[in-house]
Amino acid sequence: MFGMSLTSKVLPSDWKQANIKPIFMKVRKDQACNYHHVSLTSVVFKVLGSIINDTLVSHLERNQSLSKSWHGFCKGCSINTYLIDSYDFVTRLLDDCLLVDVILLDQAKAFDKVQHQFVLLKMEAYKVH
């Protein structure tokens, strides 16, 4: 089933359907920014995505194309290992009396800046529901 879908480059429409559920995260329920949206997708689609991801990561690891600094993709890595590596790098530079500039970006509210009407128009144009 997966092989046929990948070969034909067509996903069954049932696999692409998702239910979007708002999950309440903060104090005030009357503000949309206090909800995190979770997409509940088909289990079959999740399995296919996992197979593709595992195959791609294995290929990149075999060919040594996956940088160790890509903590989101490396096994055993996380935001914590990224922060430890970053801290270690900066402190080594400071120990060598080098100047260090650090730029910190907070992406937490990045999705609040999306023009939702534009996204809905694009979804309608491509019949994504």
Image: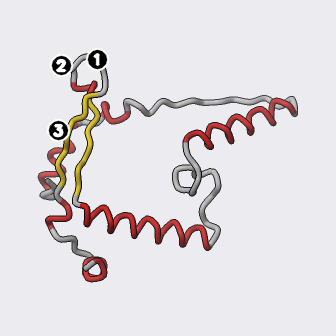
Residue pictured at 62% horizontal, 43% vertical: 81
What residue sits right under mark 1 in the picture? Answer: 27
Label 2 and label 3: CA atoms lie apart by: 21 Å
Name the mark nearer the viewer: 2 or 3.
2
What secondary structure is marked by label 3?
A: helix
Q: Amino acid at mark 3?
A: Gln
Q: Is residue 117 above or below residue 124?
A: above
What secondary structure is marked by label 2?
A: loop
- Residue 36 pos. (x, y %): 29, 34
Return the disc, 1 or 3, that comes first in the chain's sequence. Answer: 1
Total numbered labels placed on residues in the image = 3
Q: Is residue 108 above or below residue 128?
A: above
- Residue 3 pos. (x, y %): 30, 81
Q: Amino acid at mark 2?
A: Asp
Residue pictured at 80% horizontal, 35% vertical: 93
- Please tell me in which quadrant of the rendered image residue 4 appears: bottom left
What secondary structure is marked by label 1?
A: loop
What residue sits right under mark 2 in the picture? Answer: 30
For the residues bearing labels 1 and 3, Cβ distance under 8 angstroms: no
Mark 1 surroundings: few (<14), some (14-19) or many (≥20) residues within 10 A: few
Mark 2 surroundings: few (<14), some (14-19) or many (≥20) residues within 10 A: few
What residue sits right under mark 3 in the picture? Answer: 117
Residues 10 and 51: in front is 51
